[in-house]
Every structure is written in structure tokens, then in C-alpha cells.
Image (spheres, rainbow, N blue to C red):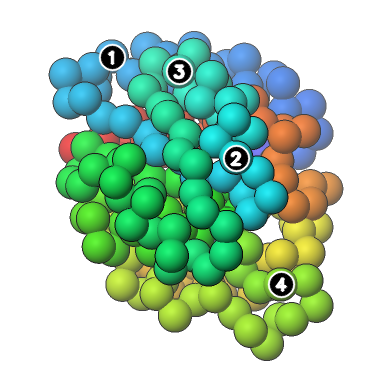
Amino acid sequence: MNATTHVNGSEEIFFAPRPEIFAMKTHRDVHATAKNCDDRKMRVVLGHGASGTAASMKPYVVGFTRRGINAVAVDLPKGKAERAVPVFIKTSGRGHEVIGGGQSFGGRVASMAAIEADFGGLVLFSYPLHRPGHTDELRTEHLPSIRCPTLFLSGDRDPFARIDLLKEAVKLVPNARLEIFKGQGHGLLAVLEQALDVASEFILTNCK
């Protein structure tokens, strides 16, 4: 069972234990709904974490594909997120048929690319709101400029995104939703099936 609350237009869902029940139910529904977007050539383009590569995003790519959503991962240069934005866009292309996203650093890059490339949506897994212990240095400056539907998925024990600060940051994005996974830290591999169900449903619901 899950409980839903709404805060200033942003939706928060807190998931209780036994996520496999939720995943089995929504996977069937999501896969059926995916047929509605087959003709749009919609694609999800994912960036990896700061210490990863495109190959490390394979579970996400495979998971989206199994749900009927085309997905690819892109190798990003190390260093500043700004430097990686052109590389992301070179792979993703531009326009509403692109759903940007990624894990941690890759999600941050995608969120910056979305502003320049006019993406149709964003799915941000474990957005790195701040460095651990540096909650006075928030990575939020660009968030109000995001115009596409945006889904943040985060664990409530993530040292890169203190949950109370993340709730406030999400409100900066005009059309955003926050999914909180209890007991999870930085990275959602332990609940990835559940997270991908939520992300797929979000993408297909916002498919235009």
C-alpha cells in the first residue's frame, strides 16, 4: 500500500514494504499503455553517475525496454556537468520526443540539457542536490527554467539529497513530481523494478 500527499502542486508518494506486489501490477498496465506512444518514436536517453559509464545504466535501459519504451544510455565526460551537456544532446537530439534522465550526475546533466534542447520530459533517479555534508551548496539554480514534466525519484536516506531540502527544490520546477523510497540511499538498484514502473507510468502519462 502507498500513501499520497500533495505539497504546493508537487506530489509525494511514500512506498511501504513489499514493492514486488506494486511492480507486478503496474508492469502489466504500463506495458499495455506503451502501445499508445509507439508511433511517436519517443525515446528515453539516460546519463550515468559520476563514477559510471553508459554500460552501468544497462539495468535501466533493459528495464525500460521491457516496458515497451525505447531507451539508450550515453557515455558522459567526467568533470563539470556543464561540460557534459553538449555530449548528452548530441546523443539525445532535441524536441519533445526525447525524455531525458539518468542516475545522479547523469540526471543532473539531463536536467540542464532539457532546458536547451526542449525535452518532452525528465526522469531523474537520485538527483544529486548537494555534496554529502554540503547542504549549503544546492544545485538548484537551473531548476526554475525547466519547462517539461519532471519526475524526481529519491531514497529518503540519500546523503546527496537531504529529503527536506529535496522537497523544497522540487517546488522550483513548474511541473514536477517527487517519489520517495523509504530506506534507500544514493541509488535505487534495490527497488529498481518499482522505480522503473513509476517512471514508465509517468512518461507514458505525459506522452504528448
State which quarter of the image contains the N terminus. Answer: top right
Q: What amino acid does circle 2 point to? A: Thr
Residue corresponding to mark 2: 53
Residue corresponding to mark 4: 131
Counting other residues with Cα less than 10 Å from the Cα at mark 3, is it few (<14), some (14-19), or many (20 or more)?
some
In this picture, residue 192 sits left or right of residue 63: right
Q: CA distance from mark 4 to mark 3?
A: 32 Å
Q: Position of residue 101 (x, y in %)?
A: 45, 46
State which tag comes first along the sequence, 2 or 3. Answer: 2
Name the secondary structure under disc 4: loop
Q: What amino acid does circle 4 point to? A: Arg
Residue at 74 percent across and 52 percent down: it is 186
For the residues bearing labels 2 and 1, Cβ distance under 8 angstroms:
no
Counting other residues with Cα less than 10 Å from the Cα at mark 2, is it few (<14), some (14-19), or many (20 or more)?
some
Residue corresponding to mark 1: 35
Q: Quadrant of residue 130?
A: bottom right
State which quarter of the image contains the C terminus. Answer: top left
Q: Position of residue 136 (x, y in %)?
A: 68, 87
Q: What amino acid does circle 3 point to? A: Thr
Q: CA distance from mark 2 to mark 1?
A: 30 Å
Q: Position of residue 126 (x, y in %)?
A: 63, 52
Residue corresponding to mark 3: 65
Q: Quadrant of residue 68?
A: top left
Viewer-side label of 2, 1: 2
Q: CA distance from mark 2 to mark 3?
A: 19 Å
